[in-house]
Amino acid sequence: MRIRYKKWARPELEASKIYIEEPEKCRGKWKEQFEKKMQPLHLELGCGKGQFMAKLAVENPNINYIAIDLVDAMLGLAKRNIEKAYQEVKIEPKNILITRFDIERIALIMNKQDEIQRIYINFCNPWPRGKHRKKRLTHSIQLEKYKQFLKKEGEIYFKTDDDELFASTLIYLEESNFEIVKSTNNLHCHPIFERNIETEHEKMFSEQGIKIKACIAKLRGETNENRRSNKA
């Protein structure tokens, strides 16, 4: 999603307690950035304006969340939406952090010590042209990076409006040693999540009559990183 430059975004982010300016310094130490360090750690890739993460984190104070996006303006809106959601229930946002980073390079800011239990990928760019498909957040190239910091049997929750992206993602997951636990070609008629928080894109596409595709995938056995460690 393209968004206009917002001159207030960078100053507000830098002044915010929930924003991490240099995520590279947190690599392997993300748990330590939270007040309750022993809680499970979940990650959203491409958080956009943050409505999804705002609702999710408020509803689950027993889980710590990290939300990543690349654009300052988008993260600025996410910050405001998250803070507003917490203000409405009159609690401090102590179980959520946001940061700006290129997800294609995510292995630079996370490793196996971070033990991410779940990754959310909602309505990512489908990159339909063949030569660009490797940029997909669900492509096998990216999945191999996620495996470096996912816990054993860690999960990926994925939603999209794009038929071809969804079909390809199921293949990518299988090829990358993920088990498809649940999947549906019509999420709103055949729910697979205990609680489906509708994103801005999801609402828009649904109103256009486009069916929402979704899946839950679980990492099988050990990650490649663990296998290499065991052989050493």
Image (cartoon, grey):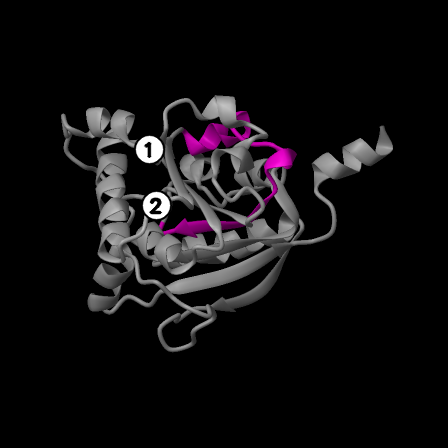
- Residue 159 position, x and y percent, is 41, 57
Q: Is residue 52 above or below residue 83?
A: below
Q: Quadrant of residue 147?
A: top right
Q: Residue at x 61, y 56 (%)?
A: 218
Q: Is residue 162 visible?
A: no
For disc 2, the neighbor class at 10 Å (few under 14, some 14 to 19, many from 20) is: some
The answer to whether residue 140 is visible is yes
Which residue position holds label 2?
93
Q: Quadrant of the N terminus?
A: top left
- In the image, taking residue 171 as reference, residue 159 lies left or right, namely left
Residue 115: say if magenta: yes
State yes or no: discs 1 and 2 in contact (Cβ < 8 Å): yes
Q: Considering only vertical position in the picture, is 224 above or below 81?
A: above
Residue 120 at what x, y percent from top left?
45, 51
Residue at numbered disc 1: 17
Whole-percent x, y for residue 204 in the image: 21, 60
Residue closer to the observer: 119 or 17: 17
Quadrant where the C terminus lies? top right
Question: In the rendered view, would you say 98 is above or below 201?
Answer: above
In the rendered image, residue 208 lying in the magenta stretch gets the answer no
What is the x, y in percent for residue 154? 61, 51
Label 2 element class: loop
Look at the numbered disc 1 and give the secondary structure of its residue: loop
In screen coordinates, is 24 left or right of 174? left
> What is the CA distance from the residue labelled 1 to the residue labelled 2?
9 Å
The magenta stretch is: 102-123
The amino acid marked with disc number 1 is Lys
